[in-house]
Amino acid sequence: MQVMAGNTTAESVSRLAVAAGVVQLIGLVSLIVFFIVGGPFGTLNDLCIGLTGLLSAALAWQLSAAFTARPPALGWLMPALAGLGALIVVVGSGLVITGTTGWVLAGLCTEFGYAWIGVWLLSFCLTPRVSAAWPRGLKGLGLVAGGLMVLGVLTLPGLLRGLDAWEVLPWYVNVGQAGGLGWLLLYPLWCLWLGRFLAIR
């Protein structure tokens, strides 16, 4: 398999991307099943969300090693933001799994964390080497997913106020929750496409 940069291979990045995509889609299916039948599927969804956050941070660092950003500072800053976002996502999952907060406040934390992963995704898809060499559709899907994920920054006021009931959320916080479309569906599809693309290069 072609070496992308240093010790980072297309094969290893492909596997990591596929893992992130599969885990998040398992989480999405679990969420749907939870709303239909209840049971432990909500917890499975929360676990998948947190794990995908961690896998996303690892993916960001591996892709950063493979595709150096310009200016070079972005080569470490953007993956660092993805790592920060992943930690916030894990906190959000932990809050609801342990019952420390309700699902609304934990969800705001999750949205805010994925917003920073979205910032990395936008930056990465605009990296010149990616723009020149990758399929236009793959880049476009990443930009759309990342753009939606970034909306999660709008949840910060609700998070800081500790709002934990749907009916008290301001309208702009609800807009921020639209970022869920990005990280629940479009981002895992991007990861799967990325994994396939790198596997057949």
Image (cartoon, rainbow, N blue to C red):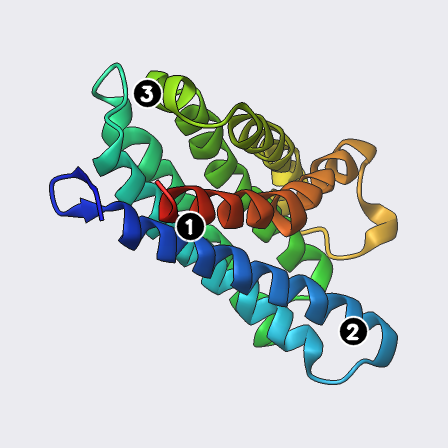
Which of the labelled discs sits on residue 56, or is there none? 1
User: What's the residue type where badge 1 is placed?
Assistant: Ser
Along the line of sight, which residue is nearer the eye, 197 or 141? 197
23 sits left or right of 123 in the view: right
Q: Secondary structure at mark 3?
A: helix
Q: In the picture, residue 66 is in which quadrant?
A: top left
Count all numbered tags in the image, as a single digit: 3
Give the residue drawn at x 45%, y 26%. Answer: 125
Q: CA distance from mark 2 to mark 1?
A: 24 Å
- List the residue tagged with mark 3: 129
The image position of residue 159, as x and y in percent, is: 62, 46
Residue 29, compared with residue 178, is above or below; it is below
Per the rendering, the mark at residue 69 is: none
* Chain-order first, disc 2 or disc 1: 2
Amino acid on which disc 3 is placed: Arg
Q: Give how far apart the Cα atoms at labels 3 and 1 are.
A: 20 Å
The Cα atoms of the two marked residues, 2 and 3, are separated by 40 Å
| Mark drawn on residue 33 | 2
Q: Which of these two is toward me, 76 or 135?
A: 135
